Image: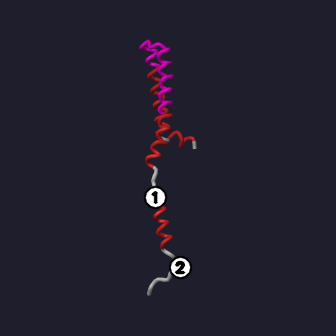
Amino acid sequence: MLLRFIKDPLVRRFFTGTLFALTFVWVAVRYFNVDQEVVRVFVILTFVVVGLLIVAGFFSSFVLHLFMRRKSGGMLDKFEENIDEDDPDEKPDA
């Protein structure tokens, strides 16, 4: 079960993306003398922006649901209406 989880392409992309981001930050701090306070503020603001995007997506999904809601029931309701119209007890004309 765990091996199948690790082989999932989305999980592998998440882990490799995280590894590359950590390596980028480590190289910036170690070799280019970037202040650790700058990196800390960058990470905090990144989480804030991602959180705001999640909240905005959550609320916009409700707005999209209002615009995309169907007035009629859809294809299944039409199918059920056709079944109700055909009375199985009715004898065919001969």
Q: Position of residue 48 (x, y in %)?
A: 50, 26
> What residue sits right under mark 1 in the picture?
74
Q: Report the coloring of the rendering.
A: secondary structure
Q: Is residue 9 above or below residue 31?
A: below
| Quadrant location of the N terminus in the rendered image | top right
Tell which residue pokes out farthest to the right in this image.
1
Say which residue appears at 48% left-offset and 72% top-offset.
Answer: 85
Residues tagged 1 and 2 counted as in contact (Cβ below 8 A): no
- Secondary structure mostly seen in magenta is helix
Say which residue appears at 48% left-offset and 34% top-offset.
Answer: 56
Q: Disc 1 marks which amino acid?
A: Gly
Task: Sort mark 2 into few (<14), some (14-19) or many (20+) by Cα contacts within 10 Å.
Answer: few
Task: Name the one closer to the observer, 50 or 11.
Answer: 50
Q: Position of residue 57 (x, y in %)?
A: 47, 37
Q: Position of residue 73 (x, y in %)?
A: 48, 58
Magenta stretch: give its range: 26-53
Residue 16: give its label: none
Q: Is residue 43 above or below residue 58?
A: above
Q: Is residue 38 highlighted in magenta?
A: yes
Task: Name the one closer to the observer, 50 or 9.
Answer: 50
Q: Quadrant of residue 75?
A: bottom left
Task: Sort mark 1 into few (<14), some (14-19) or many (20+) by Cα contacts within 10 Å.
Answer: few
Q: Disc 2 marks which amino acid?
A: Asp
Q: CA distance from mark 1 to mark 2?
A: 27 Å
Tell which residue pokes out farthest to the front in this image.
71
SS at mark 2 in the image: loop
> What residue sits right under mark 2 in the picture?
89
N-terminal of the two: label 1 or label 2? 1
